[in-house]
Amino acid sequence: MFEFEMDHLFSYHAILQSPPEVIGPVAEGLRLNYYVTGGEVSGPRVRGKVRPVGADWLTIRTDGVGILDVRATIETHDQALIYIAYQGVADFGENGYKAALDGDLPATVGLRCAPRLQSSHPDYLWVNRIQCVLVGESDVVNSIVSYDGYALR
């Protein structure tokens, strides 16, 4: 077994457009696009806001598992830009696909993701060298996602 540690970098919440843009059933599942409208970032290594750009291009598979595909931009308190992109999973339950088609998603859904961060700002070059994990939850009712972000060492 390999040893590792995790360092808390930040917590954030992002506000999503409501209702989502519904592409509808496609071969991979139900496609829903949630556009980011803003948010806040706080923590020991990164503080600032989630800029109103980017989205989660979500696909809910027929087995009820949501596949997240997220790209967004964080603007730090000192005006650095950090690009964050990640894939992850959200388990909507065995009947999640049908519930989504019926517009009856659960009020909250757990989120597990593996983001990569990129920045060219001299104070944040360290983000280019780390692998992160995000553990969070989606407040489906209020269209808010919240995460804690950790660096794996």
Image: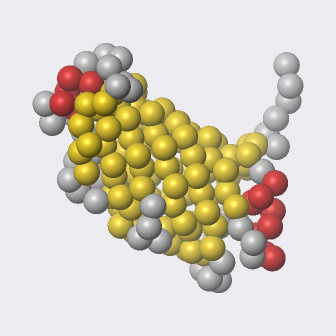
For the C terminus, the image quarter is: top right
The quadrant where residue 2 appears: top right
Viewer-closest of 144 and 61: 61
Q: Find the residue positioned furthest to the right.
A: 2
Q: Residue at x 35, y 17 (%)?
A: 63
Q: Find the residue positioned furthest to the left.
A: 102
All told, the count of numbered labels is 0
Viewer-closest of 57 and 1: 57
The quadrant where residue 64 appears: top left
Q: Find the residue positioned furthest to the bottom.
A: 78
Query: Measured along the vertical axis of the image, is residue 123 above or below residue 28?
Result: below
Q: Position of residue 75 (x, y in %)?
A: 57, 74
Q: Residue at x 67, y 57 (%)?
A: 117
Q: Position of residue 32 (x, y in %)?
A: 30, 43
Q: Position of residue 145 (x, y in %)?
A: 40, 51
Query: Measured along the vertical axis of the image, is residue 121 above or below residue 113?
Result: below
Q: Position of residue 149 (x, y in %)?
A: 61, 51
Q: Residue at x 32, y 38 (%)?
A: 31
